């Protein structure tokens, strides 16, 4: 069991999702973890320290000035022997504190003084999660290599529905198992492309493919979890960079191609998830095309480079993984694409199921045939994909 003997400090902040912390402690203990609990004052309004003490088998900490800790240094001493700090639920207020280095209570001071990784499990109203201030904080925390687990979309206690719901305790345990789990790609360098490209028509209009980038970012995160050194070449998306991943931002297919060419020689694995526009405008207008000027407008297009085919066709290519988003005849079209580009592995999904969604279903196709991964969260599918890649590499495929 990957959590056996792991020393976890579980922080609980104020919010109705605090009730889930009781089940989370139970599951962590069942998995063999040593669990120490610290709570904000607001959290004690939703669930009592007595409950968490009974479940964890340890004293629960709430006070920055607790005299039971030598020299009243609880914000330092309580985390020094921990392998990770997990804040579940993590409120919008607590995330704002963490993003800006505030430390006005025990839990926020613990996080600021930590020497171990920090994982946040957000839980808040959908409008609070989607607020631009919260999203700025998420970007800053991700840049600081803070880990995120969730949030999920669904019905909320306030009666509204959307993103901001805390993921279930079992899913939090799964995130921790992935973090502490085997590193089958340790020592490998992985290059991932993600998101759409935008091809200018004029200064304000573009040709593009619909893509949220979520699958590509999940693959980059899963590769990092598996121990790889990861470079992510990303088209324009509104997503935080996964912790520990090096990100290169591009806009057009040609820019993505150039970025890949700069990095590919040093990589062991290339995973092409990006939805690259197949064509670009040959002579984009330098001025905005007005409606009057654009009546009966025709555009001359030229083909964009096939980045995946170019990489796979190198004299000594890295292990190449392609993605095939199809609207019909999934296996047939994906298998044909794999054969045409001479790829060892391709991941296929139905575009109507995957586009913009947090979940998808994927079928892997290699020389041995089809390997359905089932339906699930994109990060779960990405982990299964990387496990399959690691297995193929181990077998010398």
Image: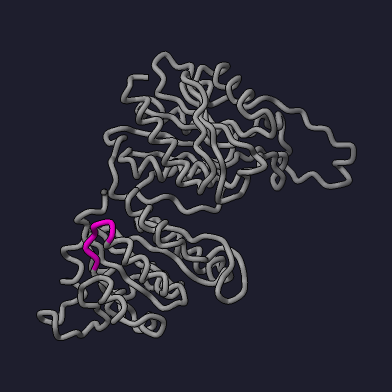
**Number of numbered discs visible in the structure rendering:** 0
Q: Residue at x 83, y 47 (%)?
A: 290
- Judge whether 288 appears above or below 385 on screen: below
Residue lying at the far left of the rendered structure: 70
Where residue 246 sits in the image (x, y, percent)?
39, 44
Instruction: Find the magenta span and give its range.
Output: 30-35
Q: Could you say which is closer to the camera, residue 150 or residue 367?
A: 367
Where residue 40 sits in the image (x, y, percent)?
34, 79
Q: Is residue 21 magenta?
A: no
Where residue 189 sits in the image (x, y, percent)?
34, 33
Image side of residue 244 versus residue 92, left or right: left
Q: Could you say which is closer to the camera, residue 285 or residue 144?
A: 144
Q: Residue at x 47, y 68 (%)?
A: 123
Q: Residue at x 52, y 43 (%)?
A: 215
Q: Residue at x 51, y 52 (%)?
A: 239
Where residue 158 sits in the image (x, y, percent)?
58, 76
Q: Can residue 257 be seen? A: no
Give the quarter of the figure containing the C terminus. top left
């Amino acid at each position: 069991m990957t959590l056996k003997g792991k020393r976890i400090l579980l922080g609980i902040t104020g919010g109705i999702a605090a009730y889930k912390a009781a089940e989370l402690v139970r599951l962590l203990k069942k998995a063999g973890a040593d669990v120490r609990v610290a709570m904000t004052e607001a959290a004690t309004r939703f669930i009592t320290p007595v409950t968490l003490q009974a479940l964890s088998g340890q004293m629960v900490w709430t006070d920055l000035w607790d005299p039971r800790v030598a020299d009243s240094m609880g914000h330092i001493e309580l985390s020094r022997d921990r392998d990770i700090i997990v804040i579940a639920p993590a409120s919008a207020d607590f995330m704002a504190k963490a993003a800006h280095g505030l430390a006005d209570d025990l839990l926020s001071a613990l996080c600021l003084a930590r020497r171990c990784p920090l994982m946040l499990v957000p839980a808040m109203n959908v409008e609070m999660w989607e607020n631009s201030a919260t999203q700025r904080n998420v970007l800053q925390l991700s840049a600081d290599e803070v880990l995120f687990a969730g949030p999920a979309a669904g019905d909320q206690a306030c009666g509204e529905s959307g993103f901001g719901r805390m993921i279930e305790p079992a899913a939090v345990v799964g995130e921790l198992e992935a973090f502490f789990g085997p590193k089958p790609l340790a020592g490998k360098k992985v290059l991932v492309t993600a998101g759409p490209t935008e091809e200018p028509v004029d200064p304000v209009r573009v040709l593009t493919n619909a893509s949220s980038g979520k699958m590509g970012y999940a693959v980059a995160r899963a590769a990092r979890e598996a121990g790889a050194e990861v470079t992510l070449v990303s088209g324009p998306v509104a997503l935080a960079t996964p912790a520990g991943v090096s990100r290169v931002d591009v806009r057009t297919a040609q820019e993505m191609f150039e970025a890949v060419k700069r990095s590919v020689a040093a990589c062991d694995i290339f995973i092409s998830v990006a939805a690259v526009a197949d064509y670009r405008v040959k002579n984009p207008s330098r001025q905005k095309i007005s409606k009057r000027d654009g009546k009966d407008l025709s555009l001359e297009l030229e083909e964009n480079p096939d980045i995946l085919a170019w990489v796979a066709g190198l004299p000594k290519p890295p292990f190449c993984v392609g993605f095939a988003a199809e609207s019909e005849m999934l296996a047939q079209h994906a298998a044909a694409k794999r054969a045409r580009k001479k790829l060892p592995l391709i991941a296929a999904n139905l575009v109507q199921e995957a586009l913009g969604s947090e979940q998808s279903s994927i079928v892997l196709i290699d020389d041995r045939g089809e390997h359905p991964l089932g339906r699930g969260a994109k990060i779960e599918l990405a982990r299964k994909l990387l496990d399959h890649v690691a297995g193929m590499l181990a077998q010398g495929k």
